[in-house]
Structure formats: C-alpha cells, structure tokens
Image: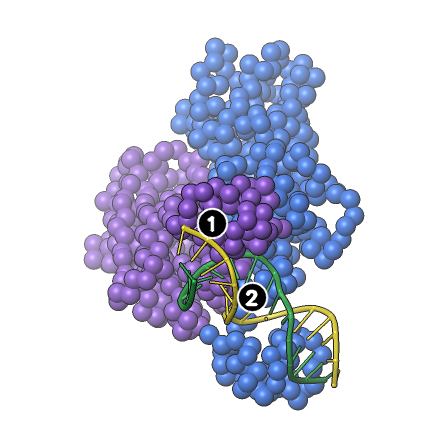
Chain colours: A purple, B blue, C yellow, D green
DNA sequence: CTGAAAGCGCTAACAC
DNA sequence: GTGTTAGCGCTTTCAG
C-alpha cells in the first residue's frame, strides 16, 4: 500500500510536493509529471483516513433514513447522490428502521468518522442532535421537522392531505376515510389534518374521526387499518392513504375483497411504487421527493462550504394527479 | 471535541489507560471509574478516524449495489445489516447505478477509507477488484459471479428460470415468452437458459428464441420488451419475467392492453414488490434475498476475523409459489 | 515553487 | 496494571 513517501522517493521530490500534485495545487509541470508517473507505477491511492484526520473532515455525507426499503426514501437518496457526487462528495446511506436508538448511533458515527455533514429524515421529532450541533457539523432535516432550529426541507403535507381528499369529494364519494401514520410523526399528523379540513368543511359527513385510523407507515399498517374500516357498520366508500406503502396495503385489502377502484375511491399521498394498477384508477398526490433530496444536498453543501446564515426551511409544493374515470355513483 | 488526552488529564491517568478503558481491556476498577466519569463530563466520543488510521481498518462494511431503488437489493441490505450490526459493524450502502465506473470509485473509497470489507453485487462480470485483492481486503460477491476467485453467494438462477417456465407449461399455456436482463449479466443469462430448457424440451413450441427479449433489469425494460412481444404476428400467451421490476413493467403493459392474468400467464423470478394484484394471479419464484445478505455478511465477518480458507461459493435454493387459478384455456 | 517538520487522535509495544 | 513513546499517512505552515 503505497504512501506519498514512496511516491516522493520514486519521483525524486518531497512528500509535500506529492501532496500538492494530488490536491491540484500549483506545482511545476515538470515535477508534476514525475509525480504522476510514480503514482501510477505504484498504484498509489491516497489514504483518506489520514487526510481526514489531518483535515478534520472527510468527503462523505451521511444520509440517515427511517426505512431504506421504502422507495420514497430511496428516491430521495438518488437526488442527494446526484448533487453530492457532482461536488466530489460520496454519500453513504444509513437505515434507522424508525428506531431513535439506531438513529443516535449513526449520528455518533457521523461525528466520530468526521463526516462532512448529515442529512437526516428523523425517526422522531426530538432526534439526538446535541453532539452534532455542539461540534458544528452541518445538518439538514428532510421530510420531517425537529425541535431544533436547523435547516430543513419539507413537503406541504397539510396541502397534500387536502388535495387527496378534495379529488375524492369532487368525484362524489360520500364517506371518505383516512389512514395515516403514527400520530407522533409530523407528516402523518399534517396529512390527516388536511383530510379532516376537507371532509369537515365540505360537510360531506359528520363524525369524521370515526373514519380516521393511525397506523404504521408500512404496507401492513395500511392493510390492518383498511380491514378495520371495512368492518365498520357504515363502511367508507373512499379512502385517503397518507403515504405510498399504506396506499399499497389498502389497495391489497380492497382488491382481495373485490372492491377495486373506482368503485371504491382511493387517493394516495405519495407515488405508488411499482404499481401494476390500471392507469389512472387511483388519485395520486405527487410528492417531489427527488427534488427534496436535491434541495437538501445543496443546502448541506453550502453549509459545508462555510455558509453561516440563519437556519432556513424550504417547503416543496406537490401536484395532484386525479383518477381519470369517475365512478357511476348515482347509477 | 475532547480527546483521550483531555480525558486522561481530567481523570489523572495516562492516555493509554483511557484507551484501554474505551476498548474494554483490563484496567483497575478504580481508575476505570475515574476515566468513565471524566469521559462523560467531557462528552468524549472516540475519534474513529484516528483509530482507523492507527489500526489500519475501520468498523464499517461497504455494501455496493447496482440499484438502490430495487427492493430486491434493499431487502438484501437488511439481511447484511442485521448480521453486521450484531457484530459491532456499521454498514454503508453505495449505489453504482449499474455503472462500472461508479463501482470502481466506491471500491477505491472502500480502500482509501480503510473499510473492514466489502460486499459487492457487481455491475459487470469483471469488476475492478485488483486493488482490493492486492491489499487483501475481504470481499464477497453477491447475486452475480465475477472473473475472480473470491467468496460468493448466489441464487440458483437457472433453476429459477426453469421453475417459472414449468408452472406456466403445467397450466397449459402454449407460447411462453421470456423477458430477461442485459445479456452480459450472469443472472439474466442463467434465468433465460432455464426458461429455454423447459420450453424447448417440453416441445411446447419451436423457435423459442423468437420469444426471448434482452432488456434492462428495470420497469422500463419490462415494458418495452412486453410491448415488442405483443406486437408479434403470433404473440405469446404467457411470459416469464427474469426479475421483479421487469415483471412489474410487463404487468403494466398487459393491464393497459386489457390482458390481465390469468388470461395471460405471468411468472416472475423474484418477489413482486408492493403488488396490489389479486392474490395468486401470478406465479412467483421466491428468491431468498434477505438470506443472501445474511450469508454474505457472515462470510465477510469470518474473513475479517482472519479466516483464510480457499474461496467458497454458496448457492441458495428458491421456492415456487404458483398462481392458484388456472385459466380456462380450452374454453 | 519546493522542502522540512510538526501534528491530527489514537493504539500498541515496550518498559517499569 | 500503568505510563511513555513512536508512529499510522497525510496536509500545512514556515523557511528558503
């Protein structure tokens, strides 16, 4: 494992000169050529650990996510990666499984590996950010807010819930239920609030909360909530699913019980991953999640480059794609 | 950012003693207590970069994947993570996007960050492993083989292709096509070979290769291949999709053209992620991908611990879940 | 433009 | 059981 000392010896220059060549600083063309030849011959790869120890930060960014299996987050990861890579940074993905303990561990690793910064989709609203902040490591929160005043990029979740419910109302459904995520998670709470605004204000039906279910943000959660709702005395005739995976779960249960859309109305906040549904049978509130990753990465890079303006929060707008075919409800 | 020197000073011991306490070596209970108190007070977090530089390897494992958005790979990642974490290692995910250049870059990073080892799902059959091997860093290949003699864990892909085709033959379909991945990728080639064995030997129909399409391992690939096949003079009446995403693409096209299973037979090698299909309308060859991750992680950890036996390859068996309802083909 | 030398924080001999 | 010390490989003043 060649070091700059060996390269220097072979090239007949000092280690400092090798370092300068490697880092693109001004060196006479003559010596630079010598160094490059020697480096190639020895298959020299700079040791980033040493560089990081010396410079006090690495060129890697941690992207800490609650659920690596959810395409929502992997799509975000692509956005982050594209920007980071263009700026010479590598991205490593860390999966917390919605567990604050695992999250705290990855946060610690980010510090102790001297990573350049972290982008965090928090597992709770009070992540363990003390250490990171005390050490002035750049952080940006994505998707969900925190109790700290740090940079963030979010969706307009309330609006997402409203839009989803609205298309269902306009189509003429009567009892529009809502399945949302854990009540402790901001995105879940906001989306269901948006839904409630619409169904309440539109006077579509009373006692909206009988038709609201909190569950996990996963397929299983959507399934069990949907099953509960269908077992009601007066079951709903439409549903707002607060995220993609719950939408999948709800659709599975509906399909299994023979109630496919548009006979039963379905609107999902978030894109349906890998759907094989007939086109436009389900209303989708598109969440610009890749853009969220891009924006977060840009903000983080600015901080890494020394930007010290006050914390900012960016809210991204979403776009509704309503189901095409209205059901024949009045038939 | 406290160092062991500051902790040592506060505790009134030497830096070496602090290091010993941190690393769980034998130290008198008395001094250990002092050290722990001082460490807590200073919020000491050991600097892994320095440790890595000194020890010549870190406690992180790189998992390098061709497509982070494919649930097949994220599911594998969960398996790796579970094992690695239990052994005190962290896993970082790297996305190559099937690009050998990006793959080579991550491989280099694994070296220059002194990572403990790498698990690689290669983007081609000749990944750039020279450096890693020369430096004797543990590697295990997953999912796809390489030209190098290194540890590996694979699926029985040929068998997977056979099983998928077989269930379709048994159900009575006449012209069973196959959509597979890039011809340069082992898993793609093997699965289509399995399909060919069955359709040829069973004498189901001649000129099988007219019904074989190579494409990308993604949804788009499945879509365009399916479209081509349907445009044939004598279109197929059933399809084997060589991976999950292509299966989704094929199903999308079939749905859009009104040919839903089981009227049109579909068998997929791999699980359908987040499907909302009617249960058991499609035959699935289950690939034990999480188990693959687990096995790979175990092998890697053995190597990291100094195991030097010759390279091993493990082949995992898969399981067929046939579609339940046979179509009324003779009607 | 180039070289010498110090030191990032930690661990592992080696003494005591 | 504990302290002293010498690096791990690199970058970066500081001289020249």
Q: Can residue A297 be seen in this view?
A: yes
Residue sitting nearer the eye, B211 or A59: A59
Please say if B219 is above or below A7. Answer: above
Q: Residues within 10 Å of mark 2 (few under 14, many from 20)?
A: some
Front: mark 2 or 1 = 1
Instruction: Give the percent coordinates (x, y) of residue B118.
Output: 61, 49
Please say if A90 is above or below B208. Answer: below
Q: Mark 2 points at which residue?
A: B50
Q: What element carries label 1?
A: helix
Residue lying at 52% horizontally and 76% vertically, measured from the top left = B3
Residue lying at 49% horizontally and 81% vertically, measured from the top left = B42
Q: In which quarter of the image is residue A197?
A: bottom left
Q: Mark 1 points at which residue?
A: A22
Q: In this view, does A48 lie to the left or right of B132?
A: left
Instruction: Give the percent coordinates (x, y) of residue B276.
Output: 47, 40
Q: Is mark 2 on a helix, strand or loop?
A: helix
Residue lying at 51% horizontally and 43% vertically, measured from the top left = A34
């Amino acid at each position: 494992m060649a070091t700059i000392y060996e390269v220097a010896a072979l090239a007949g220059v000092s280690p400092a000169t090798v370092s300068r060549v490697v880092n693109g600083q001004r060196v006479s063309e003559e010596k630079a050529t010598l160094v490059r030849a020697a480096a190639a011959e020895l298959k020299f790869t700079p040791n980033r650990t040493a560089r990081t120890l010396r410079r006090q930060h690495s060129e890697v960014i941690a992207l800490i996510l609650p659920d690596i299996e959810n395409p929502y987050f992997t799509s975000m990861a692509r956005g982050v990666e594209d920007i980071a890579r263009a700026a010479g940074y590598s991205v490593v993905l860390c999966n917390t499984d919605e567990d604050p303990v695992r999250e705290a561990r990855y946060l610690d690793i980010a510090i102790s590996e001297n990573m350049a910064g972290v982008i965090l989709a928090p597992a709770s609203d009070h992540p363990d950010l003390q250490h990171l902040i005390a050490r002035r490591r750049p952080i940006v929160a994505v998707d969900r807010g925190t109790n700290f005043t740090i940079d963030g990029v979010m969706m307009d979740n309330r609006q997402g819930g409203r839009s989803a419910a609205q298309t269902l109302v306009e189509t003429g459904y009567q009892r529009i239920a809502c399945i949302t995520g854990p009540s402790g998670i901001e995105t879940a709470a906001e989306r269901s609030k948006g839904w409630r605004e619409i169904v309440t204000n539109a006077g579509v039906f009373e006692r909206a909360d009988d038709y609201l279910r909190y569950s996990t943000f996963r397929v299983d959660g959507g399934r069990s909530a949907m099953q509960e709702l269908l077992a009601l005395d007066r079951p709903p005739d439409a549903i707002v699913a607060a995220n993609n995976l719950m939408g999948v779960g709800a659709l599975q249960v509906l399909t299994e019980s023979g109630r496919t859309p548009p006979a039963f109305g379905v609107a999902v906040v978030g894109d349906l991953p890998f759907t094989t549904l007939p086109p436009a049978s389900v209303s989708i509130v598109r969440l610009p999640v890749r853009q969220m990753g891009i924006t977060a990465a840009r903000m983080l890079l600015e901080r890494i480059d020394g930007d010290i303006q006050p914390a900012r929060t960016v809210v991204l707008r979403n776009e509704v794609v309503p189901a095409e075919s209205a059901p024949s409800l009045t038939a």
